[in-house]
Amino acid sequence: MSTEIEIQEPQTHHLKRKKGPSHYSASKRHRVGTIKTEVEDIEESSEDIAKQYKKYSNAPKYDLNSEELYCVCREPDEGELMVACDGCEEWFHARCMNIRPELSNLISKFYCKFCTWKGNGVTLWKRKCRLDECYEPIKDHSKYCSEEHGKEYMRRLLFENCSLDQGVVKKVLTHVGGEVVKLHVLGSEFPELSEVETYRQDGKIGQFPQSVRDQIELLRRRIEDIKRRKQIQIREQELLLQVKENVKTINEKLSSLIYPSTEEDSKPKSKKSKQKKRIDLCLCDRGEHVLIEEIASDEKSLEEVATKVKKRLDSDEEDNDGDDEDEDPDWFRSCICIRDRKKCYRHNGWWNLSYDDTEKLLDQLRSKEVAIETQIDVVLRDYSIQKYNEK
């Protein structure tokens, strides 16, 4: 019978695992027959499967003795190993589906050739125990079907490896002295040389060869440069936080100057009454934030800003001062934007953007610093390995 089998058998432990019960049976009568363990792979085209499916669909489901027929071969159940399809729920002989009987316990989801051809699904396998001769599925959170097979696999791995003899194993066991915890942590840390441990403690590098010292010095200079740049960004963040407070102070003072409180304002108002007018300027600074600090602390500078804001608010009032600064009513001393914050689309969220930029740069510098420190560790590790190899 020419059939194309798209089911792929598992190769040792390289299989997909799926939870859920598998649908297979020794037979409808729960008997297992003896069949060949190897089935020849046969390639089929899509047209071949289509013809087989048509023949399979039109074939009778019962023989002349009213016995039910199964599988693509349309034969009765005679105790041969059969497997149920998760797609069409029909029963098929493992032999006809190219499945070796010892793999039956590894089936997670089975789809016959016709369901696979129609795109209803593909057969999935449970992961096989790592022991070569075992065809049982592995336990949860393990690579083996049982603890016994896990021990057997490790025993073979230890004693069948040509590079590891029983003498080495004996030395390891003698070293740990029967302490399980000591055995578990054995090899978890790289054994550092005394000169490396000295460097970890005091940072001195005189004990290393010149080539190692040169590498460490170069990397150290890079770290120092990064630390210097980090401090600049930290100071910038501190300055921005102070600017934020100054902006708040300036707007509060301007609100008091331009919209002074009256006795009416001091009386309690209902919730529906109008809120008191307030000034909320953009105050984006083109400079180094020095002028912002000056306005926040100097009353004269604050009054200058208040005067200019008043003139802009009162558009009907003529400006007879002839001050050159008034050529641009949106800027104070050509350095600080004094537009209403909600109307200043150009500088929308300027403080948050500035602070985020410094934070982003700080993160980048921290990552670079860690990467360079890792490079130093690699230099020391390579040196240690070289010394060990020389012994």
Image: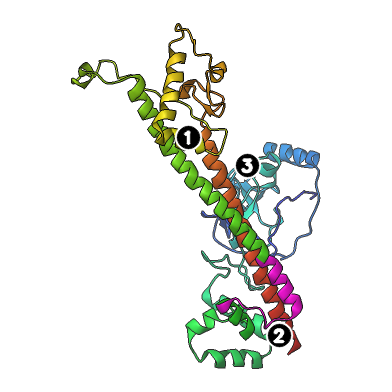
Q: Earlier in the sequence, mark 2 or mark 3?
A: 3
Q: Quadrant of residue 83?
A: bottom right
From what the image shows, is residue 103 above or below residue 351? below
The reply, left or right, for residue 162 in relation to residue 88 is right
Residue highlighted by disc 3: 61
Checking the image for residue 292, the label placed there is: 1
- Residue at screen point 60% across, 54% down: 229
Give the residues drawn in magenta, as a range: 202-220
Residue at disc 3, secondary structure: loop
Q: Could you tell me how far apart the alpha carbons at marks 2 and 3 are, in whole angstroms?
A: 75 Å
- Place of residue 38 in the rendered image (x, y in percent of width and height, measured from the top left): 74, 64
Q: Quadrant of residue 373?
A: bottom right
The reply, left or right, for residue 238 in relation to residue 226 is left
Residue highlighted by disc 2: 388
Q: Earlier in the sequence, mark 1 or mark 3?
A: 3
- Place of residue 159 in the rendered image (x, y in percent of width and height, measured from the top left): 67, 86
Q: Could you tell me how far apart the alpha carbons at marks 1 and 2 are, in whole angstroms?
A: 63 Å
- Residue at screen point 67% across, 64% down: 221
Camera sees residue 102: no
Magenta span: chief secondary structure: helix
Q: Is residue 208 magenta?
A: yes
